[in-house]
Each structure stands twice: as structure tokens, then as C-alpha cells.
Amino acid sequence: MSLNASYSFREGWIGLRRARLASVVTISTVALTLFLLSSMLLMTINIHRIIDTFKKKMSIEIFMDSSQTAAQIMELENRLLRTPGVQEAVFISKEKALEKFREEFGEDPLALLGENPLPPSFQITLKPQYRTPARAEEAVHWISQLEGVDEVVYHGRLFKTVDRWSRTILLVDFCLLLLVLVSTLLLVANTLRLTLLVQSKNIKIMRLVGATQWFIRMPYIIQGVIEGGLGGTLSALILWIVLKGVLLRFPVVLHGVLTVLGMPILLGVFLGFFGSLIGLKRFLRT
Amino acid sequence: MIQLVDVWYRIGGNAIFNGIDLQVKAGEFLYVVGQSGVGKTTLLRLIHMEIFPQRGKVTVSEYCSQTIRSGEIPYLRRKTGVVFQDYMLLDDRNVYENVAFALWATGVSGRKIKKRVFHMLADVGLSHKRYSMIHELSGGEKQRVVIARALANEPFVLLADEPTGNLDSESADDVLRLLKRINSRGTAVVMTTHRLELVQSFPGRLIRISEGKLIA
């Protein structure tokens, strides 16, 4: 393999300027498709985050007999933390439960009934792998077997509905993401082929005078990487501007912004590299 | 040096060669004549290993069509310069760059390229036009640039496909004189043409292609 690096870089750069229109088309296509892809990805990350937060909040409440002693409560807490699926168990005393009731409902049961009717309880958070209806029910089963547990309150039906909807939303989102990714790949490969078509005469001459396949490929791969990288940077810039505008109007906390801004640049370079390699195949057939 | 043994080649249902044999010796000047579409260009493409025979074998120097690997083809092509009727020059580059392109593409270093290109342009009488763009040249001058490019890698054979096809008779004579001079220095020339008057003015071995056969 005879390679002349400076020649390859110079030719790659010259190629960009010579096939100006094809280069502009390629860069714009990469920028627009990667912008679409990054927006979709940002949406997916945040939908996933919202669903996850909701599932995390789907806690299980355990009520105990009011006659339980401090030692029994401590014993139950230890057993709960050893139970499969339990990540966290927060104790809510009778007094704390009364305080919460007053805050939430604005009424005082103590004044009405003359005594505190609210039992002590534990609020259980499940481990992430148990945040599915089937596994949560499994955990509920184990918890209800524990000594000292009077009643287990678990909103199973609501959990099932949320889980079903979140699966549907993620599936649709994943399909859309896949569709956009495949379209991006095809579009980029085709537009890069346009650049190569403009320079097919150079490629033919190179082949006829005895250039090795890698020597022919290098300038075009460099050209593809530059075009892909520029397209990716442009898409990140557009996304950043759009996000800034949206966040100014609707101040919400978005997750994964940095990942989504960095991703198109890397993906652009990747697409440019493989797009050129695939596009060149046709021209390099002996 | 170049040997074709029992070469069969067909395109679709159309037979171009039916078991032809040919030998081109070092330093030979060979004319290939025949009617349009008879297979003159196909013969050159077989020697240049752009295409391969369906039967038989083509041997060029140490490379054989039956055993050559795709990675070896570029090295074969450096030993076989090609000249086309339609020039195949890069219109957006000047004369110097067009000749240098063949050397760049084969990985020759910068200093050697400059020396070699100046030498080649002097050889074909185009030193004074080295910075001219291709569209500023006459047909004969364009063909001389192509010859300079083809010779840049010092091939042992020059394959010229109708090099005078687009030229007036005066320019055609100039190109033939140049090819003869190159040949006299030891480079073999295989040239296709349909202009028999050139063969009479610049003698060489002649073969005719007719009905898939070579006639000496």
C-alpha cells in the first residue's frame, strides 16, 4: 500500500472545493438528518426519564398494627431490607402520618376523633429491576408474608396501566428512531455517491495509471469524514439554537442535552467514513 | 513480454474473440487494425487487465490473468501506459498537474515528481505549456500530454487506443513520430487504428481483427 498522507489530505480538501455543490448538498443532508435524529434521541431520553421517575414513585405502603413496639418496628425494617426487590424502606410514625394528613387534607383527625387513628407505616421503594407489574407483585407477596405487616397497599392496576403505556410509547419511539437512523444512512451514502460521481473521472484515471485501491480511497474518505463532521457540527449548532429558543419559552429541565449535542458530530464523522467507503465500492470494481 | 494464448471473450451473446493467440515482444511496434466494434479496444483492455478472458490466458510481464490477485493489478498497470482517443485528462488541472497526477497516484515522492514531470514534458515538447489549462491546448497537444502521463511511470509497453482518432493528419503524424521515438528507446507500443495510411508512413508489425480472429 503506497500512501502519501499529505497528498491524500490535500486532495481530500481540494475535492471538497471542486465538487462544491455536491459537498454543500452532502453537508446539508447530514446536518438535517442528524438534527432530526438528535431531536428524536433527546425526546426518547426524556420520555424514558419521565417514565422511570413515575415508576420510581410507584411505591408500596405497609401498615402495621399500632401496638408494635420500637424493637418490633426495627426488626421489621431489617427484614424488609432483606426482602427481594426492596431498595429502600422509609418509616412513617403515627405522629408523622398525622402531620402529613393535616398538611394534605387541612383537617385534624385528632380533634375530630379524640385520638390518632393513623397506623405507623413503611414506604417501600423497589429496586429498578422490580419496577414491572409482575416483579412488583412478587415483592408484594414476600412483603405481605412478613410478621408485623397488617396491610399492604399497592396500586397494581395503575402500575400495570402505566407500564403498558410506557412500553407502547417507547416501542413507537424506538421504531421512529430506527427509521430515521436507517434513512439517514441511506441518504448520506447516496449524497456522498453524488460527490463521488462528480469525481468519477479522477477515480478512473487513478485506476488506469496504477494507483492502489487504498491510495484512491484515502482522499475520498478524508473528504467524506470532513463533510460528515461539518454536517454533524452544523446539526449540533442548529439543535443548540433550537433548544435555547425552546427553553427560553418553556423552562423545563432536559436530560441528555450534552450527549445529544456531541453525538451528531461523532455520528457525522462515522457516516462520512462508511458512506465514502460504501460509495467508493462501485467505482473501484475492477 | 505480452502473450495471449487461446483467448476467448464474449459480451452477452456476441463473441468478440474465438481463441486468439498473440505475442508482443519487447521493443516491438504493433498496429492493431480492424473495423469499428470488431474488438480493438477489447484487446487492449484484456492486456491492461481491465477485463479477463472467459477462456485462455493473458500474460503481461510476470502477471498472468489466471493467477493475478486484485492487489497486484495496480502494479501491472504501472508497467503498461495507456493512451486514449478521448484523452481522459483532468480539465480542472493544468498540464503539469495532469502528468504529475499519475506519479502522485502511484506514491512517488514530491521531489522526484517535479524532476520527472519536467523531463517528460520536455520529451513531448510541451515544457512551454506546462501551466496551460487543458482547454487551452489543441487536440495534438492534448494527446502529447496523455503520452507524457502514460510514460511517467516508465512502462515497458504503451497501449494506445486510436490515439490519432480525433486529430487532423498533421497532428496525427506528430503523435506517430513521437510514438516511434519512444519506441526506438525500447518501449513497446501496441496501437489500435483504422487509418491505414499511418501504417504505410510509419511502418510496424500489423495484425487485423476479423470475425473474432487475429490475422497477421
Image (tube, coloured by chain):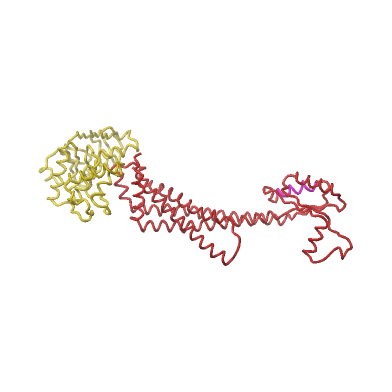
Chain colours: A red, B yellow
Image quadrant of residue B110? top left
Q: Decide which of B144, A134 is in the foreground and name it.
A: B144
Q: Is residue A37 left or right of residue B71?
A: right
| Residue B50 is at least partly visible in this image | no
Residue A153, relative to residue B154: is it above or below? below
The number of numbered discs placed on residues in the rendered structure image is 0
Image quadrant holding the N terminus of chain A, namely top left
Report the front residue among B50 and B183. B183
Quadrant of the image occupied by residue A101: bottom right
| Magenta residues, dominant SS class | helix
Q: Position of residue A24 (x, y in %)?
A: 39, 58
The residue lying furthest to the right in this view is A114
- Above or below, A86 against B135 in this view is above
Is A180 colored magenta in this rendering? no
**Relative horizontal placement of residue A89, taking residue B89 as reference (left or right):** right
Considering only vertical position in the picture, is B86 above or below A244? Answer: above
| Image x and y of residue A238, in percent | 48, 61
Where's residue A215, x and y in %? 35, 43
Would residue B64 be visible to someone looking at this image? Answer: yes
Does residue A144 show up magenta in the picture?
Answer: yes
- Place of residue B171 in the rendered image (x, y in percent of width and height, measured from the top left): 14, 50
* Of A130 and B209, the residue lying toward us: A130
Q: Looking at this rendering, what residue extends furthest in the left direction?
A: B201
Q: Which portion, as a residue range, is magenta?
A: A134-145
Quadrant position of residue A112:
bottom right
The quadrant of the rendering that contains the C terminus of chain A is top left
